[in-house]
Amino acid sequence: MKIIGVTGGVGAGKSQVLSYLKERYEAHVIQADHVGHLVIEPGGACYEAVLGMFGTDVRMEDGSINRGLVAQRMFGHEDLRQKMNHLIHPAVKKYILQEIRRGQADQWKVLVVEAALLLEDDYGAFCDELWYIYASEQTRAQRLMDSRGYSAEKIKNLFASQYKEAQFREGCDFTLHNDGDFSETEKQIDKRMEQYEIM
């Protein structure tokens, strides 16, 4: 099984790349953000700890945690944010490692793991290769304004909080340019996948 780690700045078009890998190469896709939601669901690895940290009033009628309220309470409280990260990130990684073992047992051909903190959390330790999805800041900003309605100020703050292009390029094995027409991106993906002899 080939394990590919995918990362890149917000608005780089990672979701489109993941969809193509899933459709064209039958890749199994795990998104760390999604797993982060799973681990705080009722019965999840971090559910009780989050209630203990933020109070039972963040629990909604159906038992699930009000993520918006949790985010609101963390805002401006760096210590709380760090505690939450130290709780969630190891649980997410543990879940992904379990999925890798499942994939190996079931003989999956390709597993793609997408995570914003791919480099910071050393996902390279269990990925065969790390891909950086690149798009210029101008392109990313336009995408975020068009698709999510973000303000210029919000985009500027998001960009400032993430790794810079040079850090992504240095930390990853392969840079995928996703700045223009997606058909060009597909060609780059196909060329890379040919090297793995996965067709």
Image (spheres, rainbow, N blue to C red):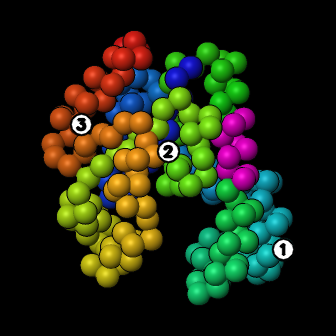
When asked about the image quadrant of residue 126, the answer is top right
Kindly identify the amino acid type of the residue bearing the numbered disc 2: Glu
Residue 15 visible here: no
Kindly identify the amino acid type of the residue bearing the numbered disc 3: Thr
Query: Which residue is label 1 attached to?
Result: 52
Distance in Å between CA atoms under marks 2 and 3: 17 Å
Relative to 14, is 88 above or below?
Answer: below
Helix or strand or loop: what does disc 3 sit on? helix
Q: Residues within 10 Å of mark 1 (few under 14, many from 20)?
A: few
Camera-nearest residue between 35 and 62:
35
Kindly identify the amino acid type of the residue bearing the numbered disc 1: Gly
The quadrant of the rendering that contains the N terminus is top right
Query: Which residue is label 2 attached to?
Result: 114
Callout in the foreground (1, 3): 3
Relative to 199, is 63 above or below?
Answer: below
Callout in the foreground (1, 2): 2
Give left or right: position of 122 versus 27: right
Give left or right: position of 86 versus 74: right
The tag earlier along the polypeptide, 1 or 2, is: 1
Helix or strand or loop: what does disc 1 sit on? helix
Q: Residue furthest bottom?
A: 76
x, y percent for residue 173:
41, 36
Q: Residue furthest left?
A: 181
- Per the rendered image, the range of residues in magenta is 90-98
x, y percent for residue 146:
23, 65
Distance in Å between CA atoms under marks 1 and 2: 29 Å
Distance in Å between CA atoms under marks 1 and 3: 45 Å
Predominant secondary structure in magenta? helix
Mark linked to residue 185 = 3
The residue under the point 58% across, 84% down is 75
